[in-house]
Image (cartoon, helix red, strand yellow):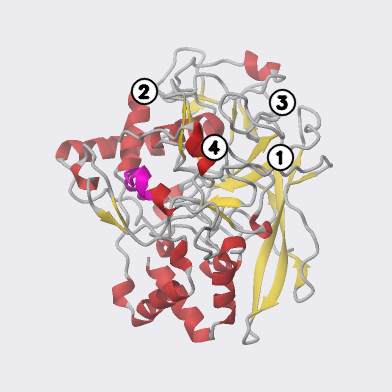
Amino acid sequence: MRRSSLPCSAVLALGLAIAIAACTSSDPVSLRSTDEPSPSSTTAVLDEPANSDDSIADDGVVDESLLPVVFANPVEGLTDDELAEFITGQGFFNEVWTPVATNGRSDSDGLGPLFNAESCVACHPANGRRRVPPQGELTGSGLVVRLSIPGRDPITGGPVPEPAYGDQLQDRATGAVEPEGAVFTNYIVQSDFYADGTRYDILWPTVNIRRRNHGPLTEGFQTSARIGSQMIGMGLLELISQEEILALADPSDANNDGISGRANAVWNPQTSQVELGRFGWKANVVALDQQIAQAFHGDLGVTSTLIPFENCAPQQTACDDAPSGGTAEVSDEKLQNITNYLRTLGVPPARTAESEAAQRGEQHFREFGCTSCHVESFTTGSSPIEAISNVEIRPYTDMLLHDMGFDMSDSRPDFAASPIEWRTAPLWGLGLVPIDGDRGLLHDGRARTIEEAVLWHGGEAQRSRNAFINAELAKRQELLAFLESL
């Protein structure tokens, strides 16, 4: 799908200002403030051991046979050729990559020298998401830490990578190369009460970087912990027209409804223009193939024609000297296969009609103002793939950035997205997220349940959260039943 670009004047018109927030260096490095909670709440340090996750072996390899496959089906109506390409791309998505071979290359070597995972499915088991352990080391957990320093790239307008560690901390490495560091996590349990006196708990994450092998991080460095999200419906989101998305934007809240969605204006390296961001937690990627190429580069250390250089920071000479498979370790054909697989990955049908409680919850969802951001439906544009062309979809997103409040803030701007802004996450398939144990919702997996994810909403969503807090138990349960039915 061809996208029209956003000129600089449009960027200004959308009010795409960046708010800069920085962490200060410490040892270990905390990525999350642990400011004291409000007086009405109580806290306790989470000290129980991590829950068992039988789908993940000791070496971090995910056994998908132990996970549900509701997110594995193609969209209905593919041609035989399109279905064959879907199956081919699915195989490559599940493929385990290996370090560069010294006695002749294969089509799946090129891993590293720095990496976080060995395959796409390692972070997206069954096309879902990994559960972040509640405490301890996160190596191989599917959670990554983005890094930058204050400022904007003078050409792209994007984040400036941290000089010694680059734009993402890689906690694994091949051969003689040392991992950049290790990420550890813990949570503080914060308790509070609904208006009816019912207690609830949410987890405040604290993530630390330890065993840093390239010296201290630059003073004022910025961080963002991110976990992979479920993969369904990406080709459908790609086909929502730019005009329709921008028509929903209200950066100055002109209608005084408290909702001021903004588009992220993102550098497109394929066109050398600023365009509408669609993908990623902060809508910081323009196109689906770029999202995949960035994951190959940052998470697996695999080069492509879109990103033809290794992910070594300038000071990392051992990384630079390590064996490399060249400028396109994943071929254009394989990248296209995976892109088409994700483009035609289907969305499970909602099950709201099967439950009267869920139907009542749908009305509460609207009454509480949730649809101000979680827009219910769109019609896709035209596509060479007829099965996803001009079809009505119900993703429950506006694809825009919203202020989610300080409690959801990271410390890292991303193009026009400030630290407190996040793209409205699509809700389709929410009740079917394939994961063993906690749901691991929100950008860093902190929310164990859908209820906790609702309770984390602040900023522009504060009024909706307050409506949920003040609702009677039956209404809360019905709202959650609706979200579970999606």
Secondary structure state at the residue bearing disc 2: helix
Range of the magenta residues?
A: 232-244
Image depth: mark 2 or mark 1 in front = 1
Circle 2/circle 1 CB separation < 8 Å: no
Q: Name which residue lies at 49% across and 23% down.
A: 307
The mark that comes first in sequence, 4 or 3, is 4
Kindly identify which residue carries mark 3.
163
The mark that comes first in sequence, 1 or 3, is 3
The mark that comes first in sequence, 2 or 1, is 1
Question: Where is residue 215 shown, x and y percent of the image?
Answer: 80, 29
**Type of residue at label 4?**
Ala
The mark that comes first in sequence, 4 or 2, is 4
**Type of residue at label 3?**
Pro
Q: Name which residue lies at 61% across and 64% down.
A: 458
Kindly identify which residue carries mark 2.
332
Disc 4 to disc 2, how far (Cα)?
Answer: 21 Å
The foreground one among 71 and 48 is 71
The foreground one among 411 and 378 is 378
Q: Is residue 394 magenta?
A: no
Q: Is residue 243 magenta?
A: yes
Kindly identify which residue carries mark 1.
222
- Could you say which disc has been placed on residue 117 in the image? 4
